[in-house]
Each structure stands twice: as structure tokens, then as C-alpha cells.
Amino acid sequence: MIKDNNNFATLSDMVNHLSQLLGVVGIVEYGGRTHTNMRPGGDYDLTVIFNKPISKNFSGIHLHVAGIPVDCMLLSVADFTLPQPADFFHLVHLNCTILYDKDDTTKQLLEGIQVNWKKPHVIGEAQKMWIRFAAKHTIDKLEHRLFDDELYSRLFITQTLNYVVECYVNLNELAPGKTKATLAYMQQNDPDLHSNINAILTTTDLALQFDLFKKISAYPAKDIGGMWQEGEALFHLNPGGVNDKGEQELFIKFLFGGAQ
């Protein structure tokens, strides 16, 4: 175990210390807590920006400051000059607050990603196909064996529910990692989906959970062709692959043309 031996009395003390480290050009915070908030409960999110990468092996650290969990990304200037974020979670920097900025470096980096990373989000055909498949996959696995292993069924439903919410964030271009903001947006814009998610997480009736899950799972695919249907051949496209229906129909004829 690597010991965390910091003795900061406050989050602000930590921020001040980090701003004085060699190579640090900026510090930003995001999430629901500010560095001046020392109330118990919740965590604190920040990113320290270095003039060059600090490691090939890690890009963040988790620690506690005066009992408050801290999630700290350790990024470099190069991470913010990419045409697209290296990690989906880096999009949180589109809506963050500068705490320290050396020579306006951080301000310029954030202005740059507002242009480059905020380009209109286009869902590729490969992603559409995968979402249509994933929406039906869990239903097919559980449809006729929901009660064979109830713990497995509940866990599988919960895992896929997380994926549905992740798709919702992506499809609506919401900030990742901000669950409260996502739920508030959902309640305002998709109240039925919000209501069904609330219901599935508050009931212990597995049959009802599964019924609600079917409705929730259909949501990500509703505007891109709907769930994969029985009797439909759904192709797994390569990244950047074209959804060429003519080619696919010819392949189906080749594959099953002689089948009786």
C-alpha cells in the first residue's frame, strides 16, 4: 500500500501547494464541490495541468484531504491540444473553473477545447449498430431465465442500466461524470425515462424490474432504428465502416442462400 502522508487542513491548502510545484501550469476544478467547501460528504474533483506528461503509467491520483475523498487528474498541455479528448471523461473540462493559471496557459487551453472538442457530435454507424444490439442483448439473455439466478439477473440489469445512462449522456452531449446534472436534465426533458429509472431502482419485485428494464433499454435506440428485432440480421460494423445494406443483403444470400 502506498501511504498518503499529506497533512493539508483544507482543500484550499492543497490547491495552493499544488500550484507551486515545478512544471504545473494550471489547476481547475469541476463537479459539485468547490475547494472552499469542507463539509463532510461527497468528493472533490480537480485537474492539475503540467507543462509535459509526468508519467507513461498513470494520469491521476485518489487521496483524502481532511477526510474528503479527492479525485485528481494529472494531465499535460499536450492532452488539451488533441483534436479530440483521449478519454471521454476529459470532456468535463468544457465546464470547469480555473483555480490557478500560469501565464494564461490554462485559459488558452480551455478556449481551444471549446472550439475543438465541442464540434457537433455525430454517432457513427458502427456505434448505432452496437447500441441497437446492446439494447436487446440483456433482454434476450434474461427473458426465459429471469428467476434461474436472481442475484445474477439483478446484477446484469444494473450493469446494463449504467450503460443506458452512459449512452444517454453521450447522445445528448451532456458532461460526463455529473450524475445529478444528468438526472436533472432527464427529469426535465425525458420525464418518462426518469420515472422508469426511479421505479426500477426502488422496487424489489424482479418481474417488475425486468418489465421496466425493457422500456428503459429501448430508449437509446429509439431514434436510430430501434432495438434489434427478431428476424433481423444486424451486422457488427468495423469502426468507420459503412452500413451498406446492398452489400449486407448479398452476403446474407451467400451465407444462407442454399439453406432449407
Image (cartoon, grey):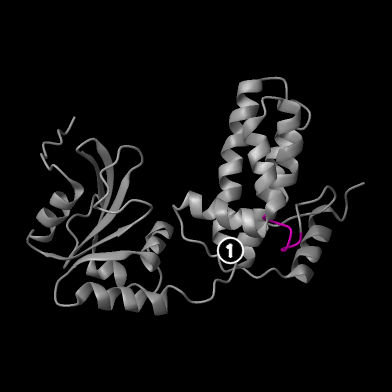
The residue sitting at 61% across, 22% down in the picture is: 151
Expressed as whole percent of the image width and height from the top left, the position of residue 88 reads 43, 59
100 or 116: nearer the viewer? 100
The residue sitting at 58% across, 49% down in the picture is: 165
Task: Please say whether residue 170 is visible from this viewpoint.
Answer: yes
Location of residue 184 with respect to 25 vertically, above or below: above
Q: What stretch is highlighted in magenta?
A: 219-225
The residue that disc 1 covers is 172
Instruction: Answer with left or right where residue 128 lies relative to residue 102.
Output: right
Question: Is 162 one of the magenta-colored residues?
Answer: no
Query: What residue type is disc 1 on?
Result: Asn
Expressed as whole percent of the image width and height from the top left, the position of residue 32 reads 38, 52
Q: Main secondary structure of the magenta part?
A: loop
The residue sitting at 27% across, 48% down in the picture is: 37
Instruction: Answer with left or right where residue 81 lies relative to residue 197.
Output: left
Question: Is 220 one of the magenta-colored residues?
Answer: yes
Q: Which residue lies furthest to the right in this view?
A: 260
Expressed as whole percent of the image width and height from the top left, the position of residue 213 reads 70, 39
Q: Considering the numbered disc 1 on the image, is that residue within a helix, a strand or a loop?
A: loop
Task: Please say whether residue 237 is visible from this viewpoint.
Answer: no
Location of residue 74 with respect to 203 vertically, above or below: below
Q: In which quarter of the image is the N terminus?
A: top left
Location of residue 191 with respect to 156 vertically, above or below: below
Quarter assignment of residue 124:
bottom right
Instruction: Answer with left or right where residue 115 lies relative to residue 26.
Output: right
Crowding near pointer 1: few (<14 within 10 Å), some, many (20+)? Answer: few
Location of residue 195 with respect to 20 vertically, above or below: above
The mark tally for this picture is 1
Expressed as whole percent of the image width and height from the top left, the position of residue 192 reads 72, 50
